[in-house]
């Protein structure tokens, strides 16, 4: 049976199909390199400032990230199943699997929206818009994984100036010999404090954990990587919606299913990228 | 040809171009991917120091390879598609590898001595 979908500039349907696939794989290679640039930024920053990532990942919910991973893996299954349905001319099966893939993409973006909105609400934005709510930071600085040290409690009558000094070192607890008075130190503090570029939490005085500066860089990297990935998910959902319309019109069969196949390849790549994003951003010990 | 694949009787059937993935294989790969995801999340609870990130990335690499080979059909495709994919990954590895080597070899202070006095 002569394949009516064979274009005049190809000799066989197999050659036409292979050409389409090759073109798609070349595009996917460029997409890998696109995300590679961001992975490179992540690598360079994490190699130089690992403490920033150990601190920053606590604000990311591992359960939501794992749920998103499962959702995308399931959507990859339904997408591959959809390609199979298209190859076998199963129009109804194709529409159901494409619909399921679309729903999974929507669920993924919904969870992403929840994660982003909770961060933005507490001021954890990127770069110069980073204005964290200090109480939210203190809540999330769980003393479990870091080296939280316990300070003696500050007395309730201390004013804000003296509150930054632990009570054990306040003048009241160490009486001076008679005739001497204590004065504030006139030596300016070093540009880099002795403990390195850490800032102690100014909210909780019972426990403190080194809080790295430049939290905005971690969140800049987080939003750039997951944001670009989210844009790719949205584009993929658009493509799948278009494939759904075309499959409803009955345009796909064993002789011509290339658009479903190539759209599926794009969706699988989006899934592969998330497979790498998840451990790098969420699963830092 | 001798074993025609099942299809809906009312829709026209053309011999599919290329290979059709068996459904049981898709589900098998999916469940392996689920298991590896569970392993990844559980492995984080075990603290192995600097090895943690490499184990997590290794498991992620295995998952990516499974998706590429079976969901993206590379196992049955012409090898040139795999060459395109692998070479993109190879160049990415080269890029990230050289950046890592470069960024960790900076020395902010080469000669440790007190700064020179300013002329009055």
Image (cartoon, coloured by chain):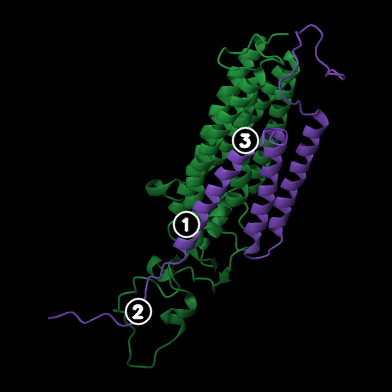
Chain colours: A green, B purple
Write down the chain letter for disc 2: B
Q: Is residue A83 left or right of residue A140?
A: right
Position in image of residue A112 (x %, y %): 57, 37
Q: Which residue is mark 3?
A: B81
Q: Is B22 in front, or is B39? A: B22
Q: Is residue A136 visible?
A: no
Q: CA distance from mark 1 to mark 2?
A: 25 Å
**Extreme residue toward the bottom, this view:** A178
Q: Which residue is mark 1?
A: B99
Query: Local crowd at mark 2 within 10 Å, few (<14), some, or many (≥20)?
Result: few
SS under mark 3: helix
Q: CA distance from mark 3 to mark 1?
A: 28 Å
| Disc nearer the start of the sequence (3/1) | 3
**Snapshot quadrant of residue A143:** bottom right
**Snapshot quadrant of residue A144:** bottom right
Position in image of residue B15 (x %, y %): 76, 16
């Amino acid at each position: 049976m002569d394949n009516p979908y064979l274009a005049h500039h190809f000799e066989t349907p197999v050659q036409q199909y292979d050409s389409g696939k090759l073109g798609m794989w070349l595009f996917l290679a460029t997409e890998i390199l696109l995300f590679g640039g961001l992975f490179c930024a992540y690598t360079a920053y994490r190699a130089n400032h690992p403490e920033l990532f150990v601190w920053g990942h606590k604000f990311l919910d591992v359960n939501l990230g794992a749920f998103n991973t499962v959702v995308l893996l399931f959507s990859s299954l339904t997408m591959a199943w959809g390609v199979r349905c298209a190859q076998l001319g199963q129009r109804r099966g194709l529409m159901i699997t494409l619909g399921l893939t679309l729903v999974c993409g929507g669920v993924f973006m919904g969870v992403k929206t929840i994660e982003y909105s909770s961060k933005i609400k507490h001021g954890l934005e990127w770069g110069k818009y980073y204005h964290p709510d200090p109480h939210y930071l203190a809540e999330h600085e769980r003393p479990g994984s870091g080296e939280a040290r316990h300070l003696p409690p500050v007395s309730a009558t201390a004013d804000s100036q003296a509150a930054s000094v632990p009570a054990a070192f306040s003048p009241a607890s160490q009486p001076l010999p008679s005739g001497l008075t204590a004065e504030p130190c006139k030596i300016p503090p070093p540009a880099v404090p002795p403990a390195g570029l850490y800032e102690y939490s100014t909210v909780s005085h019972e426990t403190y954990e080194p809080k790295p500066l430049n939290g905005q860089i971690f969140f800049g990297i987080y939003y750039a990587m997951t944001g670009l990935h989210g844009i790719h998910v949205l584009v993929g959902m658009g493509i799948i919606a278009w494939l759904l319309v075309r499959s409803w019109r009955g345009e796909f069969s064993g002789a011509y299913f290339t658009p479903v196949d190539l759209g599926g390849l794009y969706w699988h790549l989006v899934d592969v990228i998330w497979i790498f994003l998840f451990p790098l951003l969420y699963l830092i010990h | 040809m001798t074993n025609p694949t099942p299809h809906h009787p009312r829709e026209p059937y053309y011999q599919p171009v290329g290979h059709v993935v068996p459904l049981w294989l898709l589900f098998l790969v999916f469940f392996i991917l689920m298991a590896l995801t569970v392993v990844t999340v559980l492995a984080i609870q075990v603290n192995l120091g600097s090895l943690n990130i490499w184990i997590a990335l290794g498991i992620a690499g295995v998952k990516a390879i499974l998706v590429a080979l079976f969901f993206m059909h590379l196992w049955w495709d012409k090898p040139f598609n795999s060459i395109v994919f692998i070479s993109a990954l190879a160049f990415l590895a080269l890029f990230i590898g050289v950046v890592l080597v470069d960024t960790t070899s900076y020395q902010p202070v080469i000669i440790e001595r007190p700064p020179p006095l300013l002329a009055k």
